[in-house]
Amino acid sequence: SLGASHAVLQWVSIGNTLALGAGLALGGQLGDQYGRRKMFLIGVAGYIVTTVLCAVAPTGMALAIFRFIQGLIGSLMIPQIFGIIKASVPEAKQPAVFGMYGIVLSLAAIAGPLLGGVLVSWNAFHLSWRLVFFFNVPIAVVAFVLGYLYIPESLASVRQGINVLGAIVVAVATTLVLLPLSLMSTSGWPAWGFPALVLAAALYAFLYVSGMRKFRDQNVHLRQFSLGMAASLLFFSVVGALFIILSLYVAQTSQRSAWGIALVMLPYAVGSVLTSGVSTAAEARHGRALCVLGAALSAGFTAAFAGLLHINPQPAYWQYAVVLLIGGMGVGLCAPILINLILSAVPHDLAGSASGLLNTCSQIGAAAGIAVFMTWYFDGTDSSSFISALIGMTVVYALSAVLSALLPKASQA
């Protein structure tokens, strides 16, 4: 409806991803230094404004620009969530809160894309895709009001200033990773992609080495934090890609509507809800074991799913339900504990900064997973391509389980 070229529409998504990923580390620092509640509310307010602008965008270029700004605003808002939880919630209750947050993320990951499809199909008032943006506005307004009323302010006890150089290096390195990965999933791998990844790796290595002494001085459990970040990158690279590919596969191999696809996904969310409560209740004594079990269960889920599709390329609903229930249980066991183990490696003063880095890592993992597994999926025919992608996901989940096994048995905060 905007009459935009394919290249412009491509940047509607890519620009948002780049801006969000590049700004997360700086957003976390700003929360630590100037107040996490303040930055969160500024972020939500900015999100409301940019969402309205996206909804009324007159051209494709305007939409791409507004989405880019929306990504920057999101990078100010998102890192504050973990920081607020870590700084404001008693330590004994943090695993339960992270568990609830994990449940919300699981439900949102399923409901978001599918609800978007339903809204576009509904086409109320002939708004088409604009309805998706308008739908988000009242939700964001409620989030702002609740945040204003109930979130306490928190910030670092010692204000050390913003590491501007570090924030710039993280932004550049993250862009060098996300840009070729984002282009790969839409236009193919660019010729400059590998040099960009090499340069990004060098920049990340520089950040790691230069930050080691500072982190040790600030009582950061560096090994725990690094291993947890690596495990998180691998784990969420599969979670991010799986929903997209599964939705495409179900749509291509059945006559299910958007609601029908949502029902196929529902057992995954149910499984996540069921085990999130178990994981948070037992995290203090069995955190690492449950995290490893969750990652291993996720690997078993993708392997079983591949076997099911090999036997029956068009499974019945109950067959989908069984394997997806297992997959959701794996995520519910692993994700909340993994997040808590990572954030417990840093003191409260660095909660926002650590959250920014964790979200950056998850963003890179999701982009890499979508790019690699989507390319894998479209490179084959029929169910064979999905089976190949699922086998690859199994390997990645297994590697995540191995790294999780190297973490401490419980949080060290």
Image (cartoon, rainbow, N blue to C red):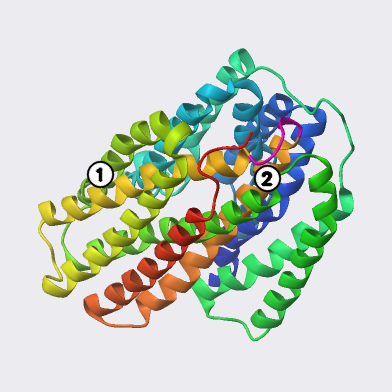
Return the residue at label 1. Answer: 266
Between discs 1 and 2, the one toward the N terminus: 1
Residue at (67, 30) in percent of width and height: 40
Q: Is residue 112 visible?
A: no
- Judging from the image, what secondary structure is the residue with disc 1 in? helix
Task: Please state which of residues 61 and 71 is positioned toward the viewer in this rendering.
Answer: 71
Return the residue at label 2. Answer: 356
- Judging from the image, what secondary structure is the residue with disc 2 in? helix
Q: Is there CB contact under 8 Å for labels 1 and 2? A: no
**Up-down relation of residue 193 to residue 88 (above or below):** below
**Up-down relation of residue 23 to residue 279 (above or below):** below
Q: Is residue 219 left or right of residue 139?
A: right
Residue 167, magenta (yes or no): no
Residue 48 rendering spot, x and y as whole percentages? 60, 33
Inter-mark Cα distance, 1 to 2: 30 Å
Residue at (66, 17) in percent of width and height: 152
| Three-letter code for the amino acid on which mark 1 is drawn | Leu
Specify the principal SS of the magenta part: loop
Q: Quadrant of residue 233?
A: bottom right
Q: Quadrant of the C terminus?
A: top right
Task: Please state which of residues 116 and 78 is positioned toward the viewer in this rendering.
Answer: 78
| Residue range of the region highlighted in magenta in the rendering | 345-349
Residue 133 rendering spot, x and y as whole percentages? 50, 41
Q: Quadrant of residue 276?
A: top left
Q: Residues within 10 Å of mark 1 (few under 14, many from 20)?
A: some
Q: Is residue 272 visible?
A: yes
Q: Residues within 10 Å of mark 2 (few under 14, many from 20)?
A: many
Residue at (46, 57) in percent of width and height: 235
Residue 346, magenta (yes or no): yes
**Up-down relation of residue 228 to residue 409 (above or below):** below
Image depth: mark 1 or mark 2 in front: 2
